[in-house]
Image: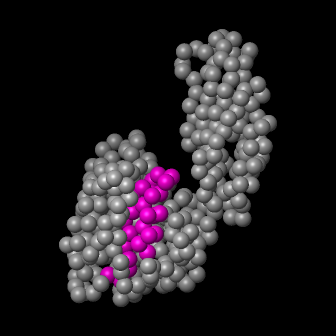
Amino acid sequence: MVTERSRELLKRLVSIRSVSGSEESIQLFLEDFLQRRGLQLHRQRVDRNRFNLFYRGSSPYLISCHVDTVPPLSMKGAFVPVERDGRIYGRGSADVKGAIASLLTAIEIFRERYPSRRLPVSLAFVVDEENNSALGSLKILELLEHERYCLVLEPTYGVLCTSQMGSFEFSVRVRGRSVHASEFEKTENPVKVCFEIVRLLEEKLSRPVNVLLIRGGSGHYAVPEECRMLLEVRIYEGERGEDLEERIREILKKAGGSCEILWEVEDVEEFIRFRSEGFVEFLEEVHETALGERPARGTMPSWTDASNYHRAGLGCVVFGYGSLEDCHTSRESIAVEDLYRMSLFLTALFERLR
């Protein structure tokens, strides 16, 4: 019964297109679903037709999940859920509609068991998480009163994440002198300079460089005048973004030869060690009660809304099932078994807080 409920809910959620910036339809669905189960929700306008949904529970605990997804990108039929080999495929299935489906299932079960009781947790369904602006979780902070701990739902492979990796994202533009391609030895190729910049950064910073975008050349048999890149490197615990920025500046000064190198910082997120003492142990106990085992602890490798909750003083843990590796790709999916496990965990959480 639990599996069937969460499975059908996930398929319905995936079929609602909710690319960041266009979340109204899925918020209307969630609002209707929860109000039919007796929850009084508050609409919080974020901008124009975009709004968060907030429910205030009877404990200091908050569960937050974002409702937006990235675009289909290379995923064909991204909003037509497909179940195959025990998995449900579709954009947002793992990030993070699978967790939302499990949450709705747990809420439904709680309301059936205790129709006269308030849900013992506050809920935040926020927009805009897939953008650097993260307006949804920033705005929801205005509504928090007695909430002190926040469980942020994200695909973490079933690991309780008590910290979050930092990242330094920056753009690089290399400009040079174009020549006819048959005379390419007479100039420096900005594309090749970009390759050398990546090599130098990895060597000098002693860490891998993530090339998010590289663009240069036209295919019309000429050495390109410029090449552009969007790069990202990790910020580890104990490091500061401003120190890393200075190191990158010095490296880029020594690269390029006759080419001009322009660069700009796009986004910086420091490494965060969440205030999770007491909270994470509580979640471990709940998980053991529900599933017979204590989950591992770890670090979330990607930015999440927990950053905003942490800065507001809440104790945070990021948790969920599913493969982060497959999110934002054409492979995005989640195992039906993971929906079941998450539903059991959240149901046990509600019972414990009751």
Which image quarter: residue 291? bottom left
Picture quarter with the C terminus: bottom left
User: Taking 7 as reference, is 265 above or below it?
Assistant: above
Q: Is residue 21 magenta?
A: no
User: Taking 84 as reference, is 185 above or below it?
Assistant: above
Residue toward you, 168 or 202? 168
Which image quarter: residue 30? bottom left
Would you say 213 lies left or right of 119 here? right
Question: Does any portion of residue 160 appear in the rendered image?
Answer: no
Q: Which residues are magenta?
A: 119-144
Q: Residue at x 35, y 78 (%)?
A: 56
Residue toward you, 160 or 279? 279
Would you say 60 lies left or right of 76 here? right
**Residue at the left extreme?**
36
Would you say 174 lies left or right of 144 here? right
Q: Residue at x 26, y 79 (%)?
A: 109
Which image quarter: residue 234? bottom right
Q: Position of residue 313 (x, y in %)?
A: 55, 74
